[in-house]
Amino acid sequence: MNDKKKNVPVVRFNGFSDAWEQRKLGDHAKYRRGSFPQPYGNKEWYDGEGAMPFVQVVDVTSKLTLVENTKQKISKLAQPKSVFVPKGKVIVTLQGSIGRVAITQYDSFVDRTLLIFDDYEKETDERFWAYTIQKKFEIEKLKAPGGTIKTITKEALSSFDVHLPQFEEQQKIGILFKQLDNTIALHQRKLDALMRMKKGFLQQLFPGNGKKILRVRFAGFDEEWEQRKLGDHAKYRRGSFPQPYGNKEWYDGEGAMPFVQVVDVTSKLTLVENTKQKISKLAQPKGVFVPKGKVIVTLQGSIGRVAITQYDSFVDRTLLIFDDYEKETDERFWAYTIQKKFEIEKLKAPGGTIKTITKEALSSFDVHLPQFEEQQKIGILFKQLDNTIALHQQKLEQLQTLKEAYLQNMFI
């Protein structure tokens, strides 16, 4: 019999060995639905002097918190007809995105589309309880057709099995996850700040709307950037692959190499670590070889996705390869130039999506080019930023993986 069948989690804090108590949720927790006066459209129910946060499903995040500012504020007139929930209570959504859980971080009034856990039959740590409910709904989603809970009744909720250790063990688990959540939130804020910084530099260091002089420059550079047609500056070609695609001889085997398709180009100016397909030695002479360090751009599917190849590869005909330039050009600077150009074209396109791109249209793109030395400085700046962002993303992913492992092993 494994530990979970014995009501004992896989991982525990020292000093705790008793089996966890299994109970029905309805026997352990006292809960009720929120409320709001009808009709929702009555303007008297919202805002004004003394208005307070009004929590609806849309205000519950996926991170066990409420949004900083609720979409609506409930008026003083409507408050007696609703349900007040003090800071620090566990709530769960019952409509829309069913099973989304939060610990309220401020006093608020709560809509009838949410459930509030008011009290417990035994002393219970709120954070431990929040994760218990979250995990329980995740299990229920796995059982549901299509992985979505369409509805949840009070009877079904009451019959949920929950597992509870002593309060002291709950507290330790709650503290651990609070520390993890705080650390993850801190790294997320740092990452968001870096992304905003990068976006700001992209706006300031690359000209737009026909401008040739920038608001921000590196010291020692003051000349106008040269405006050219892309086709006059860059030499490029499409990739290639022998037909038909379904021929198994074109894939894998001894000497096979990465074969880059649209799906292998990320949104971070890189290729995936491992391409979906490998091109066989037999097919390679019929393909297009691209050495490490070249700029490529997607021409089908997600049009305009750019990468600097970080390994030698062969490239599909759904991508364009920039082989060379009429003047010395920094590859990273060029990658960002092309990326920004496609972003501008997307803004012009109906629905914000480029359906197709011809060689003629691409050749006629206006590009702006400073001296090579300035390109290099801009390229180095963005390389440093990209590396720092990648490190923070990696750390964040590690923390999220660690948290997931603890959730799997510290709860029943």
Image (cartoon, helix red, strand yellow):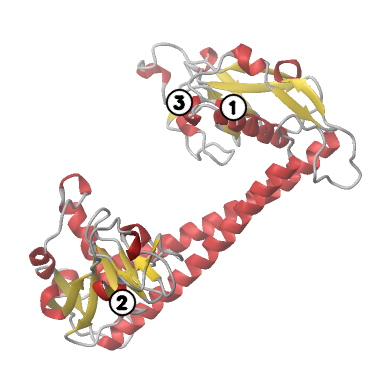
Left or right: where 219 falls relative to 103: right
Amino acid type indicated by mark 1: Glu
Question: Is residue 240 at all visible to an observer of this figure?
Answer: yes
Tag on residue 150?
Answer: none
- Badge 2 density bin: few <14, some 14–19, many ≥20, Cα 10 Å: many
Amino acid type indicated by mark 2: Val
Of callouts 2 and 1, which one flags the residue occurring earlier in the amino acid sequence?
2
Q: Mark 2 points at which residue?
A: 85
Secondary structure under tag 3 reads: loop
Amino acid type indicated by mark 3: Gly
Task: Locate residue 89: give its quadrant.
Answer: bottom left
Residue 135 image point, x, y percent: 25, 64
Alpha carbon separation for disc pair 3 and 1 = 15 Å
Of callouts 2 and 3, which one flags the residue occurring earlier in the amino acid sequence?
2
Q: Name the residue under label 3.
A: 301
- Badge 1 density bin: few <14, some 14–19, many ≥20, Cα 10 Å: some
Task: Locate residue 138: give its quadrant.
Answer: bottom left
- Badge 3 density bin: few <14, some 14–19, many ≥20, Cα 10 Å: few
Residue 298 image point, x, y percent: 53, 26
Q: Name the residue under label 1.
A: 345
Whether label 2 touches label 3, CB < 8 Å: no
Of callouts 3 and 1, which one flags the residue occurring earlier in the amino acid sequence?
3
Relative to 348, say whether 10 is above or below.
Answer: below
Left or right: where 323 falls relative to 107: right
Q: Nearer the viewer, mark 3 or mark 1?
A: 1
Secondary structure under tag 2 reads: strand
Relative to 372, say whether 96 is above or below.
Answer: below
Nearest the eye: 358 or 45:
45
